[in-house]
Image: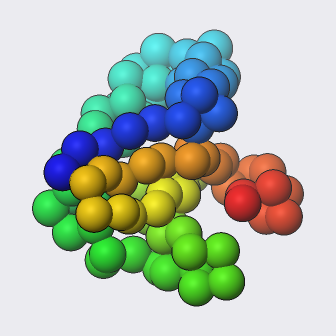
Amino acid sequence: MIIRWTEEAHADLENIINQAFERDPLEASNISKRIEAAEKNILAFPKAAHYDAEHDFYDRYVPRTRVIMVYRVTADAITIYKAFHTSRDPKDKI
């Protein structure tokens, strides 16, 4: 199984990391590393997250960040649709 990022999710992640970099380059580096670790965890345990049955999405909180990865699991791939920063309006998560 593979992980795919949508353009929107990739843009979200870029924005989160760029804003963190402006505050502290080390913080941005740490967020990037934690996102990579979360990807590995999602690959190992794709359904070990909060499941939103209404929208058929999973939400995975990235530890020690304010990022939630919103994704869908299919037979051949895990597609990440959003890298949601918790400072944003929760209505924008999906």
Residue 91, by quadrant, is bottom right
Would you place residue 60 above or below residue 77 in this image? below
Would you place residue 3 above or below residue 15 in this image? below
Would you place residue 20 above or below residue 47 in this image? above
Would you place residue 2 above or below residue 17 in this image? below
Residue at the limit of the structure toward the bottom, as seen here:
53
Locate residue 53 relative to residue 47 in the image: left or right. Answer: right
Residue 46 appears anywhere in the view: yes
Q: Residue at x 30, y 51 (%)?
A: 77
For the residue pair 31 and 25, the one nearer the viewer reads as 31
Locate residue 29 relative to residue 50 in the image: left or right. Answer: left
Q: Residue at x 72, y 60 (%)?
A: 94
Q: How is the image coloured?
A: rainbow
Residue at the limit of the structure toward the front, as seen here:
75
Where does residue 66 sit, x and y in percent of width and height?
57, 52
Where does residue 17 sit, x and y in percent of width and height?
54, 25
Residue 63 appears anywhere in the view: no
Residue 43, by quadrant, is bottom left
Where does residue 10 sit, x and y in percent of width and height?
54, 29
Where does residue 2 sit, x and y in percent of width and height?
23, 44
Numbered label tally? 0
Locate residue 16 relative to residue 34 in the image: left or right. Answer: right
Q: Residue at x 48, y 70 (%)?
A: 58
Q: Residue at x 65, y 74 (%)?
A: 55
For the residue pair 67 and 71, the one nearer the viewer reads as 71
Locate residue 1 relative to residue 50 in the image: left or right. Answer: left
